Amino acid sequence: MMDFVNFHLIPGVVLGSIYALGAIGVTLTFGILRFANFAHGETMTLGAYLTLTLVLLTGWHALLFLPVALALTALLVLAMDRMFFRPLRHAPSIILVIASFGLMLMVRSLVQVIWGTELQGFSKGITLPWVLFDSLRVFPKHVVILTAAIALMVAVHVLLRHTRTGKAMRAMSDSPELARLTGIDTERVVRATWIVGAGLAAAAGIFLAYDSHVETLMGFKMLLPVFASALLGGLGRPYGAMAGGLVIGVVEELSTYAWIGSEPLLPPGYKAGVAFAIMVAILIWRPSGLFRGRVF
């Protein structure tokens, strides 16, 4: 029983919290800008590599640079929006989707040119878990990741519910035309959306790298479960994205548990297939998701 908790349930919750952060950015972009941003995964990669650079330059702990990495990533994403997405703001959604796919390839190639393609890490030492109640093993990094992820989700809740910017974002998500007629500065809302989405994506990439390692394909590998989380929760529903991310993360980890016999139910290499299967099932049986998001 404790093996189930130590090696499947706890890692699943941690992974789900990382997925949730990425999925919030996806669902905000879709809800307000009305397109699926395939470059979102590369935003996670940028956050991780910017943090890695700061760690290599100073030797300090990676999480000390979290605010700096989030701010730098947000500035880069705002620059990308001005160069690639703003000229296409009123184009059909499929044009923006194709542009985001091209941007994804460009950013990935640029990352590989600057930082190389080899695996790297924030720290080279081995961290031992805390042993509680003689059998419960909890890694300190998992506690830090989960605590920080929850704090960021609470910050998103406060932003959306208790600030003028958040209310403007919700209004524009419901109806961009009506929001514009009521005097809301829609470009300001778009900038806020990119900043929030980029910051959360960068945090997700940093936490994933802190839990494992940094690689140029990490964002691409995260893209499928993050989109599956957003679809499961309901597109345009940030709270649904949080719930969807936790569900996808836990289900992925539990799929490798030995439910029948002594062998894993699925090999670890098939975990991404679990996210894909859930995404397809949601699209077929409940395309609006758990929180009744948008269906176009």
Image: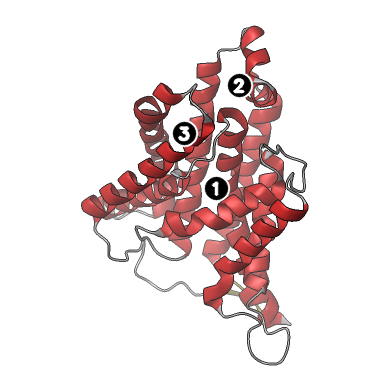
Quadrant hosting residue 25: top right
Disc 3 marks which residue?
96
Query: In the image, which disc is placed on residue 170?
Result: none
User: Type of residue at label 2?
Assistant: Thr
User: Type of residue at label 3?
Assistant: Leu
Query: In the image, which disc is placed on residue 22?
Result: 1
- Residue 14 visible in rendering: no
Q: Indicate the secondary structure of the residue bearing disc 3.
A: helix
List x then y, in percent, for residue 261: 71, 92
Disc 2 marks which residue?
165
Q: Nearer the viewer, mark 3 or mark 1?
A: 3
- Residue 191 visible in rendering: yes
Q: Indicate the secondary structure of the residue bearing disc 1.
A: helix
Above or below, 13 relative to 286 = below
User: Type of residue at label 1?
Assistant: Gly
Q: Earlier in the sequence, mark 2 or mark 3?
A: 3
| Structural distance between the alpha carbons of marks 3 and 1 | 19 Å
What residue sits 36% from the left and 61% below the top? 215
| Structural distance between the alpha carbons of marks 1 and 2 | 20 Å
| Quarter of the image that includes the N terminus | bottom right
Q: Earlier in the sequence, mark 3 or mark 1?
A: 1
Above or below, 41 relative to 189 = below
Quadrant hosting residue 17: bottom right
Q: Earlier in the sequence, mark 1 or mark 2?
A: 1
